[in-house]
Amino acid sequence: MSEHHITPLKTYLAVAGTLFFLTAVTVWVSYFDFGSFNIIIAMGVATMKASIVALFFMHLLWDDKKNLTMFVMSLMFLGIFITVTLLDTGFRGGVNSEVEYPINNRATFYDSLPLTDTHGHPVDEHSADQHGEDEDHH
Amino acid sequence: MAENQKQNYLTHPKGIMSWLLTLDHKRIGLMYLFGGIIFFFLGGVLALGMRLELAAPGNDFVSNDTYNNMYTLHGAIMIFLFIIPAIPGALGNILLPLMLGAKDVAFPRLNLASFYIYTIGALFVMYTIISGGVDTGWTFYTPYSTTSTSNVIPMTMGIFVIGFSSILTGLNFIATIHKMRIPGLTWYKLPLFVWALYGTSLVQITATPVIAITMVLLILERLLGIGIFDPALGGDPVLYQHFFWFYSHPAVYIMILPAFGIISEIIPVHSRKKVWGYKFIAFSTLSIAFIGFLVWGHHMFTSGQSVFSQIVFSFITYFVGIPTGVKIFSWMLTMYKGQVSFTPPMLYALSFLFLFTIGGLTGIFLGAVALDIHLHDTYFVVAHFHYVMQGGTIIAFLGGLHHWWPKSMGTMYNQTVASICCLGVFLGFNGTFFPQFLLGLRGMPRRYATYDQQFAELHNYSSFWSGILGLSIFISIMNLLWSLRKNNKLDPGTNPWGGMTLEWTHTTSPPHPHNFEEEPVLEHGPYDYDKVIVEPTFKK
Amino acid sequence: MSHDNSSPKFLQHHFHDVEQQYETAKLGMWAFILTEVLTFGGLFVAYVVYRSWYPEMFVGANLLLDVNKGLLNTIVLITSSLTMVLAVWAIQKKNQKLSLFMLIATFLFAFMFLGIKYLEYSHKFEVGQLPGEYYSYMGPEIAHLNNPHIFFSIYFIMTGLHGLHVAIGMGLIAWLIYATAKGNLNSEYYTPMEMIGIFWHLVDLIWIYLFPLFYLI
Amino acid sequence: MDRLTEYLFPKQVSTFAADIDNLFYFIFYSSIVLFAIVVLGMMYLAVKYRFKKGDEVRLTSSKDHSNILEALFFIVPLILVSITFVWGIKSYLQMIIVPDDAIEIKVTGQSWFWTFDYPDGGTTLNELVVPSNTPIKIVLSSKDVLHSFFIPVMRTKMDCLPNRYNVMWFDAQEEGVYDILCTEYCGTGHSQMGAKVIVMKPAQYEAYVAELGSDDENIPLDELGAKLYTKKACNTCHTLDGSALVGPSYLQTSQMWGQERVFDDGSSTLIDDNYIRSSILEPQTQIVAGYQGVMPTYQGLLNDRELDALIAFLKSLQEDSQI
């Protein structure tokens, strides 16, 4: 199998370097507030990283194009799944506004949950006992 | 050479372990066939039980709960344990490498593994039945499936496991079709059954993972209350339906595409005529497989999904109709200027054309949103999908079984009995399901154990004919099995229908353990009845 | 019908030559990758749909995740991907020792990934940020938001399934270490290593999306 | 012909029913033509080119395409499905866009009965009363699992989702009593989850709604109980003749009055007023051995007098059967 393409070591190291760099970029960007652009930037960077991994580490760049087709197909079907589902979930209220939102936006079990501090401990003693009982109930 | 001729995959090697651990695709195919027929029988018995209950309006035979268990298991067994694995797993496995001139599928060990995964899934289903059944319907709609006290978890586990068997078969076939063809066997020289299996496999590997993850989410919803599908916890039941039908609509094409492939083989061979519109049939297979991924929402026209998606789904649904129509016309015209023999496989193919056309055309009614709102979840839908699944897939499966029986088993069944059974299946099927269209129009909902007096006459009629249907299928399978009796062997050189594909022309019946004595050399295309004469030979 | 004596013993009887066997395995592997993408795909759909329904809750809930641990895991996983690809490179270059070393490194990085994941999970368990009905964390940052348990359900299922893949990957890499050490894999025949490599990069690739989706945005 | 149409659709009562039926007939006749072409063509070709006894196996024609035919296969179905699609959507929009002046009635599905809440506060069970020639907006939801609200004569149907509303509407053109069916599978009592829609003249409807809930004061308890037995859908699951449906028969309970009743957890209690009352209001706490705990609570659906009435009615059954 010596006729297979052997990628030079330099390429691999450069690819890994780029991946680290892009990771740093995406974390750095997340500290700024660009509104909905944050999502677009984060997904754009993730897609760049994913493409690099697929093309170089997974050898799709040098492989039989059938394999690339297979991979692109998977993304295409995933795209179909997401887009077409959103056609429903994003437009429920199109004609009758009652249909748009659930009747209760908050599941009922929250009513019996006590408020907690940042360590998950109930804020006051009384509700702590109740909370303990609740857990036994499960 | 004489000794070699006696050696075939059925008799060599010997012993039970040589079957259980076999890597031979033909033996694995036979094991699938055996498993499939057992579940076909079980599903059929459940169906007849349901028809018995429905013969009269009240709870005359079983209680509501028993009926709900029966129809759920009938659906789940027929779909997940019989139709989906039966054609690709049985006929596909036996024939695919033979048609490609290969010695085996690409990954024989994976092939055996996928059979055993199927068996494990089947065990889960059997456990469900023994431990009290499941009553949610094969669709497992939430929140009923998350609150029902019946055995939802083992059943969904079973479906999850069977999904992997389906995925492994699919990826095995794709690799086989791409890489295992003999030199010279280009895409346009492939038998159409191979194209059909290719389309099927693509759908299998793309759609099946989604049902697997859906079943996982459903199980977690029951165990942990994750709140994705259960409205009591903030989830959305309509989202579950999207997940479910993203698999289950393409699954319809996993079921019907191989049937198209079988019909595309039977009609040219038994008409001794070049197939009409080879490329149209081949590409319509792929386009149906693709469009099938975009139309799942037509199962949800009354679910409350957005009006926008209703329109989009209805629109795309019609694009499935066009390539399907092209196929039907092409099969019909294949007989033009041919030499049509009315053999049992051909009779099945002709009944397929009749029944599947009805099944396809009634789909047009259901694709029109306004009309579907009236017909949704009524017996019209029940009749429609039985015309497609039974009138289409199962009839084609029986036809294929009769067509390739002499090839795979080396024996010939009684053709007169087989033809009479085919007629019985045809009449019994129409008698059972045609009245159900009328019931649906009148507004008879599906999944009812009892019903109003106004529906009694048609239900009673349907039940009567279902007995004839069941009996005919039973006798036709017994007829096949009876041919396996001693001293009924055909001469290994037999080619009873004059088939032209590699499995008929280049190997014995039953085939050699390694398929071919030596690698076949392609001499002509699969349907070159205008260039080469292949005499049908029939020798004991 | 046996191959002539010149054909290597790893060539299975139903293939013509080594090249066909290699190409077939690779195509099969990619078909498998396709199914993996769609398995995770279902969960991505759930993520996208619920994010579109509860945008504030998702933003609020992902502030509860530990970005530092997530970032550390990203670096660990990218490094392990590099060592994996170097293992294949080394064996192509006939350097079995280096290959073995790289495999062991990959295994250790995978173990490290799961270790960090364990720390993250156990913290979530402690404070009650659990999936579904078991959710009980009502801290001041989140108490006013609706249904954060759905976020944590999706988080645990996606990272859990990903973690399961890491664990399976570790099992496969362990087998590779064994096979390489015994000399069953060499520059003539390293198909399993390359296939498991592809699987391992897929695990990395999925994490590349999970990291920003849960920790950053 | 009459006999045939009798088997097709039920009566057309809503404004859009005729349009939908016409769409059906359009597809139906087009399909008949296509079907006839396929089946007659198939029979003709099969018989004409059949392989007769004594024929010789020969090379057959190489004809395998015809551009004109192929174009026809594409174009004719394409035209037909285009018409169907546009017609289907046009009619659908008409079914989903509710007129502004519609009366709004809330419909709640619950295993296994329907509750109807009218705009002025009245409530009925399993009996939807609507005025004729008036658009009615139905706002659907469910208390437990999915149900689907289907009125065949109106040609309309919509699923009831828990925790979410769905909307449908109709405008009944003819007075009468018609069936309502549940078409989304919902468990044991699914096949019995029927109701009636009663279409009245608008004046009658006004009177009916005004009277809702006020007529029960003056009738004797056991008669009121008998009325509630059907009105509150008890009859879906409990018979009066001793046979078991989803729940135990009232007659059996009545005959066991004052005796021990055994529950599925092995405990037991005496059958008395209190037991009946709690089993209506909290049906899940004590489940009679041999039955499933599937009854919904009637808390809030029955007032005290109505509870007393049901108990009185149940007791009276025993006396009736002894006579």
Image: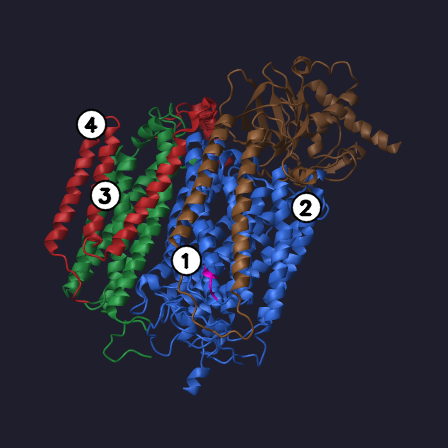
Chain colours: A red, B blue, C green, D brown
Q: Secondary structure at mark 3?
A: helix
Q: Secondary structure at mark 4?
A: loop
Most common secondary structure along the magenta stretch: loop
Instruction: Report the disc number at residue C74.
Output: 3
- Magenta span: B334-338
Tell me the residue that label 1 is attached to: B196
Provide the chain ID for the residue under circle 3.
C
Between D275 and D132, the one lying in front of the other is D132
CA–CA distance in space, label 2 to label 4: 68 Å
Above or below, comparing residue B17 to residue D162 in the picture: below
CA–CA distance in space, label 4 to label 1: 53 Å
Task: Estimate the x, y position of residue B94 in percent, counting from the top left.
Answer: 44, 67
Task: Estimate the x, y position of residue B454 in percent, counting from the top left.
Answer: 70, 38
- Say which quarter of the image contains residue B101: bottom left
The residue lying furthest to the bottom in this view is B2
Instruction: Report the disc number at residue A32.
Output: 4
CA–CA distance in space, label 3 to label 2: 63 Å
Provide the chain ID for the residue under circle 1.
B
> Is circle 4 on the same chain as circle 3?
no
Q: Nearer the viewer, mark 1 or mark 3?
A: 1
* Magenta segment includes B337: yes
Q: Secondary structure at mark 1?
A: helix
Q: Amino acid at mark 3?
A: Thr
